Amino acid sequence: MKDWQRAIREVEAELARIDNEDQIDVEMTLANILRVQQDLAHSESRYRLFIEESTMGIWHVSMRVPASIRLSTREQVDAILQHAIIDDCNDAMARDYGFSQGSELRGTPVLSLMGDTEHTREYLTFFINNRYRLKNAETLEHDRRGNPKVFMNTLIGRIVNEHLVGGWGVQRDVSKHRFAPQFPDIERDVRSLLDQLNQIALCASASPNVLLPIRDAVRSLNRILENAGEVRDACDVPKRR
């Protein structure tokens, strides 16, 4: 049996243990991979066609040095960041990071994509403590140009002889949904503030009583600052240079 066939069957076994919940679209993609692989009589070429045609990012990570699951959680996180590489992915995943083809990412260390950040370590810690699987887990990363990205991930690790040797995953780019809703509110508040400042200017020329519109302007400014802070927090870290 080929390595990719063995990996698919291991993923299928793990998926069987996952409880059904409302948000299962990502896991269904993984399940479809397994079903198609079986239905196509183990045809590797047609299996790869299914992977490449998916609109979701699909990838496989291998550990250059497998990590014993008997190590402490922190040691396992260190091992993943040090030894995990992308050894297979489709074009959809490559586009998530600003590349054109999956081949451009193959062989890339996971560390260079996710970075060694507090958020990354928390994500990997939860993955390990949750029996080497995650569902709809969020990561905050950057594309090749340093732009902040938010991905929703489903990840299933491969354990062989009590060692983490790799894992299959599916990711969705939800950056637009995470960041974009903030900006219409900010634009609305800016327009409101400009209108109020115009009123202040008119009142100042006609009457000394301008306290009320000034207070309204301050409230609008505070809302703008709060929204800007939420956007900054969503980005997690500044754009990479």
Image (cartoon, rainbow, N blue to C red):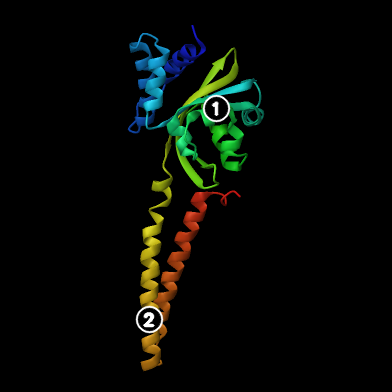
Q: Neighbour class for label 2 at 10 Å: few (<14), some, many (≥20)? A: few
- Residue 156 seen: no
Q: How far across and how far down the image is residue 133, in percent?
A: 49, 26
User: Which residue is identified by label 1?
Assistant: 106
User: Which residue is identified by label 2?
Assistant: 198
Q: How far across and how far down the image is residue 108, in percent?
A: 58, 30
Tell me the element at label 2. Answer: helix
Q: Residue 53 carries which label?
A: none
Q: Is residue 182 above or below residue 40?
A: below
- Find the residue positioned furthest to the top: 1
Of 28 and 33, nearer the camera is: 33
Q: How far across and how far down the image is residue 231, in percent?
A: 47, 55
**Which residue is at 51% across, 55% downward?**
232
Q: Is residue 219 above or below residue 83?
A: below
Q: How far across and how far down the image is residue 73, in percent?
A: 62, 29
Q: In this view, does 226 lie above or below 116?
A: below
**Which residue is at 36% across, 8% downward?**
41
Q: Earlier in the sequence, mark 1 or mark 2?
A: 1
**Which residue is at 58% across, 19% downward?**
165
Q: Count the numbered circles shown.
A: 2
Q: How far apart are marks 1 and 2 (CA)?
A: 56 Å
What amino acid type is highlighted by mark number 2? Answer: Asn
What amino acid type is highlighted by mark number 1? Answer: Arg
**Which residue is at 60% across, 17% downward?**
163
- Residue 101 seen: yes
